[in-house]
Image (cartoon, helix red, strand yellow):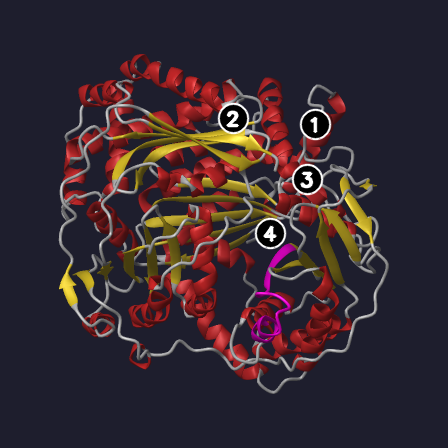
Amino acid sequence: MDNGAVLHVVQQPWARQAGVCLRVTAGSHDEPEGYPGLAHFLEHLLFLGSHDYPVDQGLMAYVRRCGGLVNASTRARHTDFLCQVPAARLAPTLQRLQSLLARPLFEIEAQRREREVLHAEYQARSQDADSRIEHALGQALAAGHRCADFLAGERESLPVEQGAFQQALRRYHRGHYQACNMSLVLVGPQPVEELLALGEACLLAMPVVESPTVRPCASLLPLRAPRLLLQQADTGLILGQALELDDLGLEPALQLWLDALHDPGPGSLQDQLRRAGLCQGLQARLLYRHRGQRLLRIDCPGANAQGAAALQAEWLAWLQRLRGHAAWPERLQAWSRLQALRGDALAPLALAQHLQDQQPEADARVLLALDKLLEQLASGTGLIELLGSPEPQPNWTAVGLDLPLLALPAQTLPPARLQSTLADVAVLPSPSANRQSLPQVALRWHPGPAQGDPAALYWRAPIVADDASLPARLAMLQARIAEQASLCQRHGVELHLQVEPDAWSLALSGAGEWLAASSACLLPLLLAPLSAGGAPAPSGQLLRQLLQQLPLLGQGETASCLQGLGVGLDGAAQRQVEALFVQVDALADAGMPIPLAEAMRWRELALLGEEWALLLFCPLPVADAAHEAAWRLLDQCLQEAFYQRLRGELQLGYALFSGFRQVRGQRGLLFGVQSPHCEASGLFAHIRHFLEQQPARLAELTPTAFASARAALQQSLELPRSHVEWAEQLWLAHRAGLPADHPLHLVQAVASLDQAALQRACRDLLLERGWQVLASVPSTR
């Protein structure tokens, strides 16, 4: 655009929602060195009201009220603002996004409160294993590069009371949050012309103040510490890879190479390393991207210090063999086709995010960049070795967070012995190629509500008895299907695996022709008995650890055999699926909804971390459309107030949520909170006190505000849906013992809601019938 902004729009005719990804090309590495965390702090402040919209009318409140999703993230060299909303709500959403970015309030008292939220987040991240590993990899880089800094931000680094800090904050916002630094991707069902008009209106209203602030970027290379030893519970091996190349064609070349790296086919590096017992597989992820610089993290599960040198020798030999390989042009064409398939299967927001990072280039340019990439990779100049050890290590001083870390001396690598090479492009075999007939299945087909969008297929089966925890079961099943799951995903099939105390479930979505083939590959592996195994070490944010155990709450029917439900598959694809089984029966209704337990259930789990987290599930008193409609509206009216009270006013922590959810076979309201200073019983007391205050607050709703909330809920539930959304609704209804036409009755019930029904729902909630709590007990084992 004339003001320097970039706009990219894509029409998805089958979508009901619109996806928004606005990127500001500035992040934590662009902030003043004297104030670590300032960029992340600014991202938080932008959501605390603008000159055009107070907090309760701003972007977050508006998107939540219309049943959408909103999020933001600050990375090293960019900050993303993400939304997914009903398509009809795209214009007001963009107006609020523009105001949020261009006209923030910067109120001092709000800054003080938000600093405490960032401090709690800093404390959690500083103890998170993944964050510490990535911080350690940064220490290997050339001195002066900000990838070595831990830039989360905490009390001491954000002196909001000082005038110099306020000047730096406004200078950063003014210098970076202007049109020439912004890239906007819109994906929705609207015609391209309408999407263009909406995007242009948003970007043309952005500030054009001055030349953008440009911060020089230090070099990643040469490495100052290629071998490091980090004190941690996991004694395995992590590799890092630093790259500095011409940016032209680099990103698609890198993605093409990563596709080859993750290929598990015969003769591939993954295949050879597994067979040699050097590791169970390699998984690479991009940690840093800026111009021609890249930093990769490569996890090597199953590797250890004894085999680290041999693994690196095989890695470098494989890279050398890839240079000039004759199969690269064919592989590039296949990869490009699969990229298009993946894009077709993505939801609007996921596609918008994908397109922000995509750099389409001509094939010849990609292959030229690939040759330069492989040359640098094979030289080993940017290869980092990070080993874990439970033994104490000396203190390594670093910006933002010191580490127990030791630099190790260089080592001589042994000769490579394997013959790994560029594997042939893996193709999903046709269903008929699977000669293993599967046993009985109970199956149901539904036509799709629209044409042209991805189909969806759900499977569920009992887990043959084992003693493992839910995370351990999930880890074992994921490891079992990893190779085939990767193959399915390469063909544009999205898959999501879940486990419950007595069953697993698998959701597949993508082109109908690939769903039968994916099922043929995955189902035999999932149906085989599980062997007993220990739980994997818990990791990640505490609240996420607790959510992995969420199926311990709720109640549901026991899966007696394999069940399936598909939406949007044509007749040929349906016949291919049915041909996999010896016997196909019609999927019967799940039966009556599960009655509520009278007493509250409280369950505690010892999870790794020094904080507390709690999930409270409040099931519906009656599982019918009328009660569910009222509770969904209640949820919509509570979300923003819950967020403001527990996070903004009480400052319990930075991680919390509320929402209407289905847990196994029960539907209801789910509340989640993580706190660094309030233990579980206190968190429960705060949630209950908040709920006790809501009848009085809801009584003050004006008729206009009530009607607006009801209309937003109705719009979010209206049919028709995409095949994937419709399949999920039908599957959840079946699991809850509800009829297939329940979603239609729900829309009708919302239309007839009045304020008295909302008040009754709130009173029913406060009866505490069937409440279930899952709480964490801190553990530092």
Q: Give the amino acid type for the residue marked by disc 1 in the picture.
A: Leu
Q: Is residue 302 magenta?
A: no
592 vs 528, nearest the viewer = 528
Q: CA distance from mark 4 to mark 3?
A: 14 Å
Q: Which mark is residue 51?
A: 2
Mark 1 Cα within 10 Å, few/some/many (few <14, many 20+)?
Answer: many
Q: Is residue 272 magenta?
A: yes
First reached walking from the N terminus: tag 3 or tag 2: 2
Task: Give yes or no for contact between labels 1 and 2 (Cβ–Cβ under 8 Å).
Answer: no
Q: CA distance from mark 3 to mark 2?
A: 19 Å
Which quarter of the figure is the C terminus placed in? top right
Q: Which mark is residue 158?
A: 1
Image: 105 above or below 277: above
Residue 447 drawn at (x, y percent): 18, 61
Residue 67 drawn at (x, y percent): 34, 38
Image: 745 above or below 346: above
Q: CA distance from mark 1 to mark 2?
A: 23 Å
> Disc 4 marks which residue?
4
123 vs 245, nearest the viewer = 123
Residue 639 drawn at (x, y percent): 38, 28
Write the residue at 42% across / 21% down.
Answer: 684
Mark 1, secondary structure of its residue: loop
In front: mark 1 or mark 2? 1
Q: What range is drawn magenta here?
A: 270-287
Task: Give yes or no for contact between labels 4 and 1 (Cβ–Cβ under 8 Å).
Answer: no
Mark 3, secondary structure of its residue: helix
Mark 4, secondary structure of its residue: loop
Q: Which mark is residue 175?
A: 3
In front: mark 1 or mark 3? 1
**Residue 573 is drawn in which quadrant?**
bottom left
Write the residue at 85% across / 62% down.
Answer: 410
Q: Give the amino acid type for the residue marked by disc 4 in the picture.
A: Gly
